[in-house]
């Protein structure tokens, strides 16, 4: 008999595919990551359950694009500075192919807080800008809701250590805030000025990723009575934390 955890995990997979993604019989499914900080290999058991259930629901084909944030960390540390405009175009081509054919796309987001905090912001910005350039055709279709796509999250080791340090045997990890006390000034629909008491350079680098990043992409009204708000926990996961309070998002939201 499966454990309660395994039963709940199977229920989560059911909700992901049926409710969040609305996977249809005969569709293909592409599974990937929503951000380079997601340790997809650590989530392999979840990905396996998703793949199994997708086939049981009638999916024609399931493809997984595996990724490991430690490889990005090594690249930021040791790759030549002039090499960060290099990009594996087969990845963006795969996403575009699935989108153009009306297939389903599932993105997993499970960021490890502070993984890249000591890395060169300039290199991170170049890498993100290069990715945005190659993914633009796909993101244009995504903005038009041309395919059924959803993003889901799951806990990973680095994240749980940061959010629940009291569960560690000793030496709790320090809490780092990357950007705080920031201000955005809008003019003609775009951010014309961005300042911050901490992390201002990082904030402005994010705004330079692509031409849409400085536009307002989302305004959400969230009641203080939401379960996430009432928990009193900063989860360091934007898919969760955005449900704690009213917020805005830039770019594609």
Image (tube, grey):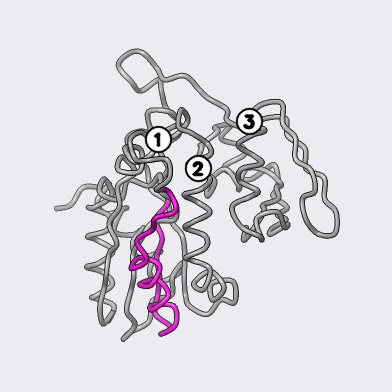
| Residue 105 included in the magenta stretch of the image | yes
Depth order, front residue of 116/57 = 116
User: In the image, is residue 169 above or below residue 104?
Assistant: above
* 61 on left or right of 100: left
In the picture of the structure, the residue carrying the numbered disc 3 is: 199
* 98 on left or right of 180: left
Under circle 3, the secondary element is: loop
Tell me which numbered mark, 2 or 1, is placed earlier along the sequence: 1
* 170 on left or right of 240: left
Tell me which numbered mark, 3 or 1, is placed earlier along the sequence: 1
Q: Are marks 2 and 1 in contact (CB under 8 Å)?
A: yes
Marks 3 and 1: which is nearer the front?
3
In the picture of the structure, the residue carrying the numbered disc 2 is: 237
**Quarter-of-image position of residue 57:** bottom left
In the picture of the structure, the residue carrying the numbered disc 1 is: 159
Tell me which numbered mark, 2 or 3, is placed earlier along the sequence: 3
* 177 on left or right of 66: right
Q: Please tell me how crowded label 2 is: few (under 14), some (14-19), or many (20+) other residues with Cα within 10 Å.
A: some
Q: Position of residue 54 (x, y in %)?
A: 28, 72
Q: Position of residue 237 (x, y in %)?
A: 50, 42
Marks 2 and 3: which is nearer the front?
3
Specify start and end residues of the magenta stretch as a single range.
84-109
Residue farthest top in this picture: 170
Q: Position of residue 50 (x, y in %)?
A: 28, 63
């Amino acid at each position: 008999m499966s454990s309660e955890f395994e039963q709940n995990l199977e229920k989560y997979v059911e909700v992901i595919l049926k409710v969040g993604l609305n996977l249809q019989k005969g569709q293909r499914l592409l599974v990937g990551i929503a951000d380079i900080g997601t340790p997809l290999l650590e989530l392999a058991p979840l990905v396996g359950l998703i793949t199994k259930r997708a086939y049981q629901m009638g999916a024609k084909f399931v493809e997984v694009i595996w990724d490991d944030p430690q490889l990005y960390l090594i690249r930021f540390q040791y790759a030549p500075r002039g090499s960060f405009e290099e990009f594996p175009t087969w990845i963006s081509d795969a996403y575009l192919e699935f989108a153009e054919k009306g297939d389903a796309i599932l993105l997993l987001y499970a960021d490890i807080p502070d993984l890249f905090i000591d890395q060169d912001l300039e290199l991170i910005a170049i890498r993100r800008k290069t990715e945005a350039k190659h993914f633009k055709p796909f993101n244009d279709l995504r903005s038009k809701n041309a395919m059924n796509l959803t993003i889901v999250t799951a806990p990973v080791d680095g994240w749980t250590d940061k959010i629940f340090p009291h569960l560690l045997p000793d030496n709790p990890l320090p809490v780092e805030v990357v950007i705080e006390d920031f201000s955005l000034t809008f003019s003609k629909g775009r951010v014309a000025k961005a300042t911050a008491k901490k992390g201002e350079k990082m904030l402005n680098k994010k705004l330079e990723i692509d031409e849409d990043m400085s536009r307002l992409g989302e305004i959400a009204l969230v009641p203080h009575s939401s379960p996430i708000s009432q928990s009193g926990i900063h989860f360091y996961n934007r898919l969760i934390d955005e449900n704690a309070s009213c917020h805005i998002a830039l770019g594609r939201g």
